[in-house]
Image (cartoon, grey):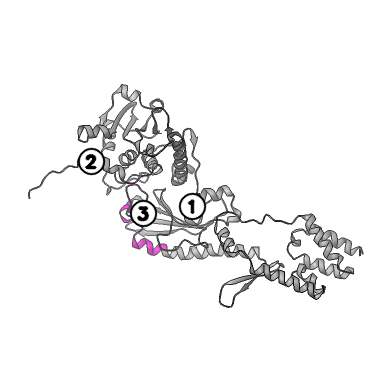
Amino acid sequence: MNHTYLPPDAPTLIESTRAIGYTLEAAVSDIIDNSISASSTSVDIFFFPIGDPHIAILDDGCGMDSKELETAMRYGSRNPQEKRASNDLGRFGLGLKTASLSQCRSLTVASKKGGQIVARCWDIDYVIKEGDWYVKKLETSEIDSLPHIEKLKEINSGTLVVWQNLDRLKMGELDFDRSMGRKMDEVRSHISLVFHRFITGEPDLKKVRININGRPIVAVDPFLVTRNTQVMSDEKIPIEGAAIVVKPYILPHLSNLSEKEKGAIGGKDGLRKNQGFYIYRNKRLLIGGTWFRMMRQGELSKLARVQVDVPSEMDHLWTLDIKKSTAVPPEVVRIHLQSVIERLAEKSKYTWEFRGKQEIDDSLTHVWTRFKGKEGGHYYGINRNHPLVRIFDEAPPQMRQNLESLLKNVETNLPLNQLYLDLNSDLRIENEITSTAQEVEEVLRGLLDQKNNSTARSELLERLAISDPFVHFPELLEKYRGETNNGHD
């Protein structure tokens, strides 16, 4: 059989791979993956927008010698079918190059091992000029001029990745300094979630400190395990000699979360958009906030989240992409996950309903009453048995008729559509029109003045003791009970 050697055209391919679709935060995360795979305990990210703008990432990992560095700089340096170590977050042997050059035209990697520093550089313009896959070998003087190289010299071993000629980041930006500040915040937010288990540390996971411009990144735990989150039992799904571990959570009710907590775990999209499965590969978050079209994102399930730990041996089953931003579960996993969804949805629904029963306690007399409609659904009416309404029983007929007209008008003109929109948001709904003790006391005194003997007053006070809003002012009720019992008519 005859064959023809057809190597890819270097200038064309290197430019084409820049369009894989990396965001800046995904690209930075890919570099951190390499740092963690190199057993780093510290990763420092530097954003420098002025003068010669650059982004640099320094770690204190094991470092590389000249041969290892050139292997790392080669496109397709690792076969994706190779078995990876449990701390290896790589996959295709492309991340360092494709992630970096998606943001810049010049990628330099300097690494220190055994006291020696070596450096190589992929310069797209140089590749275009030479017309082939030529990587630059930096001399000592060139290495010494690299940004932050002095920090690499100070540590025993590690790797420094430098992005220069940031053409993609400058594209369409009128104020590059300001845009870099905004992008830095987006990277910080992304890393705080994607690597939260490494930043926090776990019993079987080495803790990694990650800084941006000297400021430590604080982990954002999407499950709020340090709060009163409900943790359901783990489930292991054995596949091809390995196991996927599934751990469901039910977040605390919104009323128990601070605004900071809701913002952290809900992000800019809100809690409803962030419910669902969170897929981790070797403890690194790949994708979060999805039910894989196995269930709709609903209000009653928005407190439900599921941690799914996938070992790297199952990469081929999950159709993991180069950016490590998508992962589709195989059919055998989907079957098991479906049963988890059913149990979890019921538990999340109960959390909402249980909260509702707390807010509408049948032992109390509320102003509003919930009724079941004839054709399904529910409607709300003002409680005609509330003491504030019953006080008008002895009023003249015309006054009682006017009161009934007012109550019906209030009931039929509830702004239900706006209430629905407000309740579906992640903002805490609070009625800012609250009754003060002075106002309640004025109403209470007026009601008692209409009773002409102590027995009638005592009966009224007993009814008010289990009625809104008086139930919230027990000291006030006790005060007037004392006056009534002492014969102050």
Percent position of residue 369, x then y = 67, 70
Disc 2 to disc 1, how far (Cα)? 38 Å
* Residue 278 falls left or right of residue 2: right
Q: In terms of image quadrants, where is residue 407?
A: bottom right
Give the amino acid at mark 2: Thr
Query: Which residue was labeled with disc 3?
Result: 327
Query: Which residue was labeled with disc 1?
Result: 269
State which region is magenta: 313-337
Magenta region includes residue 327: yes
- Residue at (55, 56) in percent of width and height: 425
Classify the position of the C terminus by image quarter: bottom right
Mark 3 vs mark 2: in front: 2
Query: Which residue was labeled with disc 2?
Result: 12
What kind of element bears circle 1?
helix
What kind of element bears circle 2?
helix
Percent position of residue 8, x then y = 19, 42
Percent position of residue 479, x then y = 84, 58
Badge 3 or badge 2: first in the primary sequence: 2
Label 2: few (<14), some or many (≥20) within 10 Å? few
